[in-house]
Image (tube, rainbow, N blue to C red):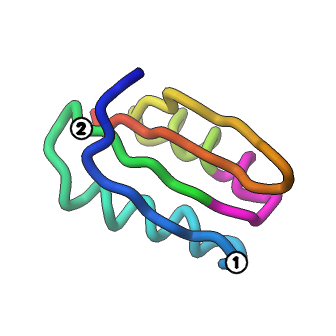
Amino acid sequence: MSEIHCRVDARQLDCPLPLLKAKQALNRMASGEVVEVLATDVGSQRDFAVFAAQSGNTLLLDEERHGEFRYLLQKK
């Protein structure tokens, strides 16, 4: 498992806020660092997959447990 350098709690926030908070965190991070994002918005799954593909950042983890989503994104 990758080392987590930043955590973003975006639970209870609606789209597009979870992704916006993740982008803000990535902007403050160095290349290769990893941000963990927790979200409850179902639309975030699609948003994070598309964002990773378009931005070149790597989606290391996309999991759902009991209505809570957890993402690990590695900055390019």
Earlier residue among tags 1 and 2: 1
- Image-based side of 3 in relation to 23, left or right: left
- Image-based side of 76 in relation to 61, left or right: left
Q: Position of residue 66 (x, y in %)?
A: 85, 51
Residue drawn where x is 14% and y is 44% of the image: 30
Residue lying furthest front = 66
Say what amino acid the circle numbered 2 marks. Glu
Check disc 1 and report its element: helix, strand or loop. loop
Say what amino acid the circle numbered 1 marks. Gln
What are the residue bounds of the magenta stretch? 39-47
Instruction: In the rendered view, tell whether residue 66 sits above or below residue 24.
Output: above
Which quadrant of the rendered structure holds the C terminus? top left
Disc 1 versus disc 2: distance between alpha carbons?
25 Å
- Image-based side of 64 in relation to 54, left or right: right
Identify the residue position indicated by label 2 in the image. Answer: 33
Mark 2 surroundings within 10 Å by alpha-carbon count, few (fewer than 14), some (14 through 19), many (20 or more): some
Residue drawn where x is 57% and y is 31% of the image: 61
Q: Position of residue 36 (x, y in %)?
A: 45, 48
Identify the residue position indicated by label 1 in the image. Answer: 12
Residue drawn where x is 48% and y is 39% of the image: 72
